[in-house]
Amino acid sequence: MKRMLRLALAGLLLMGAAPAHERQRTVLAAVPIARTDLPWWRTRHAEKLAELKQKHPTLIFLGDSITQNWEKHGPPAWRDFAPVWQRFYGDRNAVNLGFVGDTTASLLWRIENGEVAGITPKVAVVLIGANNLGRVHWGAEDTLAGIDAIVRALHKRLPETHLLLIGILPSERSAWASETTVAVNKGLAAKFGNGQDPRVTFFDATSLFAPHGRFDRALFYDPLLTPPDPPLHPTAEGMARLAAAIEPTLAGLLGDKPHR
């Protein structure tokens, strides 16, 4: 976070030094930004590099805390994610590359610093962007630029890998975050939703968590925390629904039998 703020300040200073007609805003969401000042993040990155080298995965998941949550065990039942992961992905040589708190910028840094080097997965599931709408407050245009930068970086480094790109999940953080989520997902659908890129399949999961346009708070565990937070992270049940929804597409891309 501190480095993001330093980069933002540097960008503003550079803009101020240039004539108005030459100024170009730096889109931080599309710039690789490390979080190596955080010991746990640095350690997890190193551990994941070792895991990738050992497993040579067929399937990878790239994202933030929503993805990292697959590694959690209960009780309580709402945080017992690991059994669902095992049921859907345990026999698919999968690696979880979710990092709590990552924005598009930090995922982009990980992609460019070893996390997809020396591997050839059939599929990469990408779910990123929720944290862009948090403290850093990056809007729809910037977030779309960040996701597009990730897609391009993955295409470059994993030319034989198909991307299953999941839109930002709905949340109940603020009116602005909800509106921006809708705008980002509309932008992703316009760019990737109709087969424009043969190596990307876009999946909008909004209807799973807000059926008939009604946000289902019961599918998010944040209100169960002490103190409670606004709904953002799906429960194990919510993630099971997501896994089941993408399963037909994922099985087809992997060339194996659908898991239930």
Image: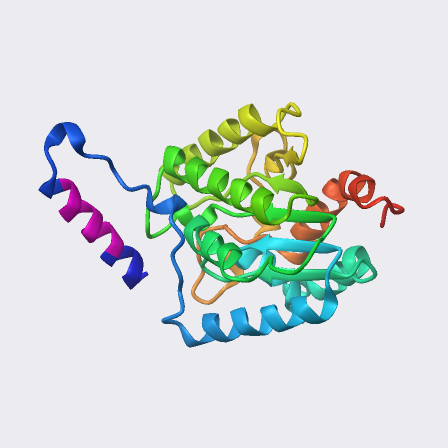
Can residue 12 be found in the magenta stretch?
A: yes
Who's the residue at 66% across and 25% down the image? 195
Percent position of residue 115, x then y: 57, 61
Q: Horizontal and vertical percent for residue 220? A: 57, 52
182 or 199, which lies in front?
Answer: 199
Q: Quadrant of the N terminus?
A: bottom left
The structure residue drawn at horizontal position 40% and vertical position 65%, both measured from the top left corner, is 35
Q: Is residue 113 visible?
A: yes
Vertical side of 220 occupied by 73: above or below = below
Left or right: residue 227 versus residue 185 is left
Q: Main secondary structure of the magenta part?
A: helix
Residue 49, located in which quarter of the rendered image? bottom right
Residue 21 picture location, percent across and down? 15, 27
Q: Is residue 141 above or below residue 171?
A: above
- Does residue 180 show up magenta in the picture? no
Q: What x and y, as percent, mark residue 100?
A: 49, 62
Q: 120 or 35, which is in the foreground?
A: 120
Query: Is any part of residue 169 visible from this angle?
Result: no
The residue located at (67%, 57%) in the rendering is 236
What is the image's colouring? rainbow
Q: Report the number of numbered marks.
A: 0
In this rendering, is residue 170 above or below 1?
Answer: above
Question: Outermost residue, right direction?
Answer: 257
Q: Residue at x 63, y 73 (%)?
A: 50
Task: Please report the bounds of the magenta region as a residue range.
Answer: 7-15
